[in-house]
Image: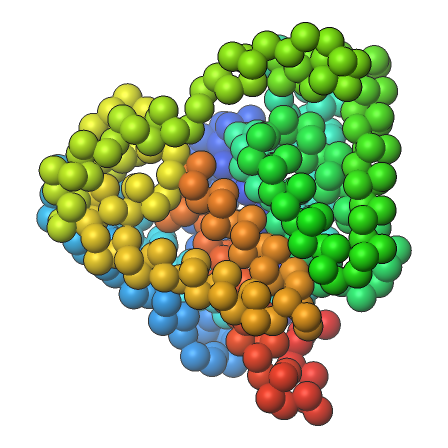
Amino acid sequence: MKILKYSILALILLNLPAATLKFGGGGVGSLLSYFSLVLMLLYFILSKKGKANVWMIVIGLSYYLISAFQYTGDFRFFVTLFLKFFIVAICGYEVIKDTSKKELFYFLVIGALSILMHTLFFTSDYGRYSGFYINPNVGGFICITGYGLSYGLKNKKMKLIGQFLFTLMGLLTFSRTFIALWLLINLLSIFINIKNIKIFVLGAVILSTLFIIDEFIGLNNPRFQQLKALVTNEQVDRNQISEDSRTETWARFYDYILEKPIVGNGYGAFQGGGVHRLGSHNTYLLVIGESGIVPFLIFTCLFLYLLIKGIALFSVAPNILMQAIGISVFLLANHNFFNFYYITFLTMWLQYQVILNEKKIHQPEKNLQPT
């Protein structure tokens, strides 16, 4: 079962089907995508099944069924996506329940290191790097998730190595969301132990490492040039820093939401090529824009639940709040929750960690966490 589990985790968390599709060809990428679903079904059949993930099932049903009423595209394509999501939500949940913090940490480290490989061997004129995750903002999300998770590890050496790697790899994505979340998580870490303030020193060391990498391979990125200007006290172009604002993207979709707030505009309307050439870059807007107010409220309540539980469990499992903040904020800048399955996996893992840690509080004599 371990080999089966690790194969699924590698395919999903390392985004191998999409990465292969991008860099190796459509045939192999599609094959890996369906292969991952087959493996999940097999794992579900062989595993000792527990309670289903009611949150994810209700969110999926409400979103897909209501958005179907306004959908005018290929019906078979829609049904395929519907079935894929529920295989992940039902069968993938059993995989996630058997995944320990260490196991998840190792896979996230591998994913983050792919960003370094991208930087060193596939230098981009665009100047931002993403590794297996294709999109630099998604690469930043993987890094901030791993960074938050590191605060839940007991091994201090492993925690420090993880913090260094995830910070450096996250900075190589030049994601503004990653930087903002990194600062917020480190401020939270001070409430765990005042000594964690030293992490900002580590940040300065990592920033120096970034300058060294720039000297050798050249990080041709406007945001990095602005960062260098800030450090060297040179003039900063504020317009360049604030370009491509997400708030401007979101504003293009507000009128469509107000036109159909109850049932939405149909599946795909807030994705690229729907009501606008660009996607909404915001999952919360996507849910309300495509399927209306009811799925939006359920979806939002899930992440409020994770945040509230994260606060309640902060003293025993600080990584839950840190990861919940990371994924909640990331979804403000990404609209692919329902088809980027590693986001779904990481959300479900967080849900199960809440359940495990609440059981530990009430049943401290039992070791409920997979090792």
Q: Residue at x 42, y 28 (%)?
A: 246
Q: Is residue 219 left or right of residue 41?
A: right
Q: Residue at x 62, y 49 (%)?
A: 145
Count the numbered circles shown: 0
Q: Is residue 166 left or right of residue 277?
A: right
Q: Is residue 166 visible?
A: yes
Image quadrant where residue 38 sits: bottom left
Of residue 276 and residue 226, the one placed in the foreground of this image is: 226
Residue 48 position, x and y percent, is: 52, 80
92 vs 10: above or below: below
In the picture as drawn, the residue positioned furthest to the right comes out as 157
Q: Can you say which quadrant of the picture contains the C terminus?
A: bottom right
Identify the coloring.
rainbow
40 vs 137: above or below: below
Q: Is residue 73 left or right of residue 83?
A: left
77 vs 45: above or below: above
Of residue 145 and residue 186, the one placed in the foreground of this image is: 186
Q: Is residue 274 left or right of residue 223?
A: left
Q: Residue at x 40, y 66 (%)?
A: 90
87 vs 246: above or below: below
Residue 279 position, x and y percent, is: 33, 30
Image quadrant where residue 335 sits: top left
Residue 171 position, x and y percent, is: 69, 31
Q: Can you say which quadrant of the picture contains the N terminus?
A: bottom right
Residue 52 position, x and y percent, is: 40, 74
Q: Is residue 4 visible?
A: no
Q: Residue at x 84, y 63 (%)?
A: 155
Of residue 366 and residue 89, the one placed in the foreground of this image is: 366
Of residue 233 and residue 243, the one placed in the foreground of this image is: 233
